[in-house]
Amino acid sequence: MHRTNAGFTLVEIAVVLVIIGLLLGGVLKGQELINSAKVKSMVSDFRSTATHVYAYQDRFRAMPGDDPGVTNRLGGAIKASTGGSVGNGRIDGPWNSSVASDEAVLFWQHVRLANLATGDSRNPAAEGIVLLDWLPRNAMGGRIGITGQTPISGWAGSFFVCQDNLNGNFARQIDTTMDDGQPNSGSVRLLAGSVASGNAVLPAELTDSAQYTVCTSF
């Protein structure tokens, strides 16, 4: 008896390919939405950190982290003892400092105690506290930091907010959203890797796969 081999018809194959295409399109669209939400979150982190500075200044007439009278204003606050001269009107210490007594680190305790930011408001040098866990993180798990020391030579600003652990795609989107989309000009600039300071990344050097630090001037 002759038996016919069962196989897929062209119509069936076409239907399967269409379904696969729709599934892939949905996955890609979903990932695009997730990435967009992360960029919005990180842009918000830049802007809210600057808002903390202005709100603290309005209330106390001092810079958080640099406030010489913070122990009298906020219960449990620690006055900075390293990283610069307290009361000079500038947040000293590198933005990614890992020294608990630096102004750039204690900035976060001061704005948290002032109820301007959420997070652990205890002394970052207290027993049992892991400093890198105590400090704020962005949507990609990188550091969020602030400093009055320019991270790029010749760049003007009263203070600078930086975030690291960002790939080139995210860094480019942040720059485009907040500034001119050029990594070496304007109020948003990029540094290669996770560094405290250095030279701004040139447009031709920016790649999607590499990691960058993004800084904004205010």
Image (spheres, rainbow, N blue to C red):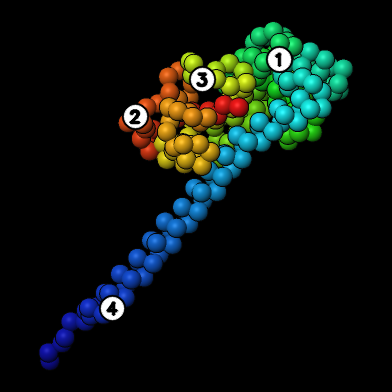
**Residue type of the residue flagged with mark 1:** Gly
**Residue type of the residue flagged with mark 4:** Glu
**Residue type of the residue flagged with mark 2:** Glu
* Residue bearing the label numbered 3: 155
Q: Between residues 47 and 110, which one lies in front from this camera angle?
A: 47
Which is more N-terminal, label 3 or label 2?
3
Residue at the image position 12 percent from the left and 92 percent from the top? 1
In this view of the protein, can residue 88 be seen by the observer? yes
Q: Is residue 31 left or right of residue 202?
A: right
- Name the element at disc 2: helix
Residue at the image position 22 percent from the left and 78 percent from the top? 10
Binning the other alpha carbons within 10 Å of mark 4 as few (below 14), some (14 to 19) or many (20 upward) gives few
Which is more N-terminal, label 4 or label 2?
4
Binning the other alpha carbons within 10 Å of mark 2 as few (below 14), some (14 to 19) or many (20 upward) gives few
Quadrant of residue 46 within the rendered picture: top right
Which callout, 2 or 3, points to the residue nearer the camera? Answer: 3
Find the distance from the CA under tag 2 to the CA under tag 4.
47 Å
Find the distance from the CA under tag 2 to the CA under tag 3.
20 Å
Residue 12 numbered tag = 4
Task: Give the tally of numbered discs.
Answer: 4
Find the distance from the CA under tag 1 to the CA under tag 4.
72 Å
State the image coordinates of residue 143 (x, y, percent, origin top left): 57, 29
Which is more N-terminal, label 4 or label 1?
4
Q: Between residues 48 and 167, which one lies in front from this camera angle?
A: 48
Which callout, 4 or 3, points to the residue nearer the camera? Answer: 3
Which is more N-terminal, label 2 or label 1?
1
